[in-house]
Image (cartoon, helix red, strand yellow):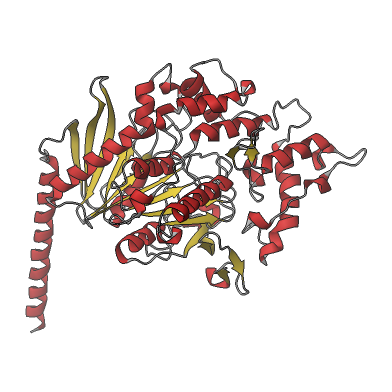
Amino acid sequence: MAPVFAAFALLVSAIAALGDATARDSQASACAQFAPDDIPGVTVTAATYFPAYARVDITNIFSSINTTDLPAFCRVELKVTTNATAGSFANTEVWLPDAWTGRTLTIGNGGFGGGVTVADLGGIAVPQGFVGISTNTGHNSTVLDGSWAGPHNDNAIVDWGWRAIHLSVVAGKEVASQYYDQTPKKSYYAGCSTGGRQGLKEIQMFPDSFDGILVGAPANFMTHHEAWAAHMSLNVLPVTSSRFIPESVWINVIAPEVMCQCDALDGLSDGIINDPRVCSFRPEVLTCTPGQDTSTCLTGDQINALHRIYADYYEADQTYIFGGYQPGGEKLYARGLVGAAPFPLLQDWFRFFVTNDTQWTPDQFNASLITLSEQVNPGQADAISPNLTAFAGAPHNGKVLHYVGWADQLISAGYSVHYYETVHAFAQENSTLAIDDFYRLFPVPGMTHCVVCFFPHASGGQAANAFGAVSQPAPLSLDAEHNIIAAMVRWVEDGVAPSQIVGVKYNNDLPSNGIAFTRPICKYPTTVRYQGGDPNSASSFVCG
């Protein structure tokens, strides 16, 4: 009878294969012929079907992907009108997986970048069953180029500030509804830096857009952040000044001393400062003695500059401007805001967004430009309202997960704590909402700005910097213990709030190079502490 059973098994296999092929052809046809009913201001410009494991090779000025690892999906490209009178529009893409979970995930951008974030549409959204939505925010540019905003291109700035994201979210949800003939059950968001700002801006203006947002190192106080960036640069510039600190001194002199003073405070000397708040770094011990080689020590002017770099920035009337650098990221700080040249993003901000003076240079910065920035608030980009009650309160019950690297070289981790605490205070004083029920902050020891993808000259730091967020290597697992997006979904849909996420550090930040260590990332204000055992295993640490 064995041959009969074998023949039957082959027949069943052939029928299944035929069914799969039929289903695939049906999906491909549905994608190619997709023509949604009228969506105001939205035109479909292309619809392309990618079978499972097909080559997906897409590049724009901001983002790229080249892989054969994705499940089947339909890529729908849209032209979304942002201002009919001005004739402005945004390019938006909606990636619709065959194996849809009923959820959408909008992906944010970074810096001044104008381009659909295809890397994370393919790296995060589609593989996890989300409909992925992303936009170029109404222009095409690299992450550091803000020249498109000038002169006086206010309409484009508003698109970048909030309008293109919002209209793309609305359009993307409607495309999903019509493509699947089913309304999305939940809508989520993920972004870092400008992407973090975009997420916070959306829930402040349109609290029903998302059920949960994941924001990393948000640049949501642009009117103050770029002033702080100028202030930081001027602490050490020009390079001919006595206060300038060369990169070699940051790496070979300051960084080792910071670790000497603070690394072991958490119970383990591992090159990571788990909680910089308990580190009272004293740079005076590095003061040059008479005749000492200045490449191995610090002058008095350099020490004064360091104190300003690590301090929060206040104006003369004690108005808070922004947080300072945190001890622990010194090996990269000279490639952030205190290097040999001003960070280019700050120069374009003041040139094209604030002053409309294309000859402006950072050495012209003064405190009056903070006031001017606040008055102009280019593109209404600031997203600093502490009032999230419309988003977080009943009946919407939205959730915020916020992460930041303690060693961030571009946006102070201290500012993330500051914003979180303003939301905390507002909720406590003006509502019955408990902060832990809707907003949780996860500072990541040793992690730099958004890890590696937005700013490729940087590194992810000595940190467990892969935990499922945008612009990161793949997490160790897609479960809610290791993948912060899955943790967000579980919190929104099952009511299980995360108190920690297990991150992984890969050798050279490449999963193919193997695991260096795993580590818990703890909910603020708790911090990770070593309790003994294998220092490379997350099980050897606790949050407390």
Q: Is residue 299 above or below residue 406?
A: above
Quarter of the picture holding the C terminus: bottom right
Q: Does residue 406 appear in this view?
A: yes
The picture places residue 506, in percent across and down from the top left corner, at: 52, 57
Whether residue 61 sits left or right of residue 322 in the image: it is left
Residue 93 image position (x, y, % from top left): 26, 39
Look at 74% across and 51% down and name the residue there: 281
Furthest residue in direction right, as rendered? 290
Q: Quadrant of residue 74?
A: top left
Left/right of residue 183 with respect to residue 479 in the rendered view: left
Residue 439 position by quadrant:
bottom left
Which residue is drawn at the image coordinates 34% and 66% (left, top)? 495
User: How many numbered marks, from 0 up?
Assistant: 0
Whether residue 473 can be seen here: no
> Residue 318's image quarter?
top right
Compared to residue 291, the image places residue 435 above or below, namely below
x and y percentages locating residue 212 in the rendered image: 34, 53
Q: Position of residue 339 (x, y in %)?
A: 65, 34
Q: Quadrant of the N terminus?
A: bottom left
Q: Examine the rendered structure and indicate whether residue 123 appears above or below residue 304.
A: below
Residue furthest out toward the front: 430
Choose between 377 and 277: the one closer to the eye.
Answer: 377
Q: What residue appears at the point 10 percent right and 40 percent down from the top-left corner?
A: 33
User: Residue drawn at (54%, 29%), measured in percent from left and top?
Assistant: 346
Q: Is residue 98 above or below residue 245?
A: below
